[in-house]
Amino acid sequence: MRLADLAYALPPELIAQEPAPERSAAGLLVLDRASGERRHLRVADLPACLRAGDLLVLNDTRVIPARVAARRPSGGRLEVLFVRPLAGENDWEVLVRGAPRVGERAHLPQAEGEWIASLGEGRWHLRVRLDAPVLVWLERVGEVPLPPYIRRPQGPALADRERYQTVYARVPGAVAAPTAGLHLSAALLEELGAAGVEIASLTLHVGVGSFLPLRDEELETAVVASERYELPLGTVERIRAAEARGNRVVAVGTTTVRALEAAAADGTLRAGAGEAELFIRPGYRFRIVGALLTNFHLPRSPLLALVAAFAGWECTQASYAEAIRLRYRFYSFGDAMLIT
């Protein structure tokens, strides 16, 4: 399968610019991947779509206000996205729009920095001179890193800080939201629990893989950037218990899938920290995940490749075509799919 096979035409007006007024009011296309049957519901109907004893696994990463405006010594502007910490406390990998030079100073809001080395593809090693941790500083000066297809001519709105974050976000470190989880309100999670659905969590910090396009047209040889994850022992134990009683592990979002499948890459699910380097594409054999709640993804993207691997490309194509015909809303602030 080639990257071009993951293409589809989307009318621009279906790219959601705002979230649904209420989180669980978003549309929900329910796909049975065995039969190809599709139903059209709302996320609020999720408790009726799952079974008592199913285990819902959430990604509790928290989006950091990672976007910062900087200037070169010459006065030229740079847009900097703080991606992940490196060896030193104030040494970070960043994504830069602009052209810094090694050894050059970076003028940052309420701070100074130095460009240490280029890491390729617009990524740089930046050392920030601060008395406080970078995360604390970013909370003060940074902006929410909304995807480029969400247009905010005046910059991110104050409401974006809350709505581009899951209600269960706990561990700061992501540069993009695990967007399937944006649909889950505290009330809906409580309703799911009352219906007998169990809930567990893990952490995968969404990184530059969400921003960098695939370079290789052949999916068999394409690679994606790794992302840090942490899988608690308690979550592993709950997964084993769900499997033992014949219930499904329901992943909320492709990031949760990637963490779970990476942690079971050698055939045994293991708790602990790791780097998810797995590129899940059609032909992949899933070891852990039995159902998936996900958004509608960009064409020619690793996330769409994962959905195609889970549901089958023909089912995925038909579902996306029907979603477009029925005017579902796409991408980060859009509607959702439940694939069972």
Image (cartoon, grey):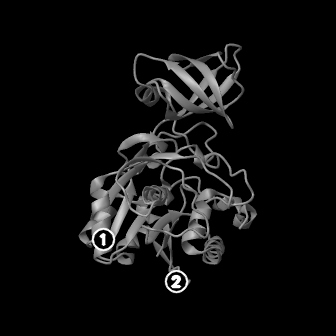
Nearer the observer: mark 1 or 2; the answer is 1
Examine the rendered structure and indicate whether residue 91 appears above or below residue 283.
above
Would you say 314 lies left or right of 335 here?
Answer: right
Please identify the quarter of the rendering in which residue 238 is found.
bottom left
Please identify the quarter of the rendering in which residue 332 is found.
bottom right
Please identify the quarter of the rendering in which residue 248 is found.
bottom left
In the rendered structure, which amino acid carries the disc numbered 1? Ala
Instruction: Name the residue carrying label 2.
Output: 34
The answer for how far apart the CA atoms under marks 1 and 2 are is 21 Å
* Residue 22 visible to the viewer: no
Examine the rendered structure and indicate whether residue 320 appears above or below residue 219.
below
Residue 279: % across, % down: 58, 57
Instruction: Name the residue carrying label 1.
Output: 242
Residue 46: % across, % down: 39, 71
Residue 267: % across, % down: 43, 64
Residue nearest the observer in this picture, 179 or 125: 125
In the rendered structure, which amino acid carries the disc numbered 2? Ala
Would you say 339 lies left or right of 191 here?
Answer: right
Residue 91: % across, % down: 50, 25
Secondary element at tag 1? helix
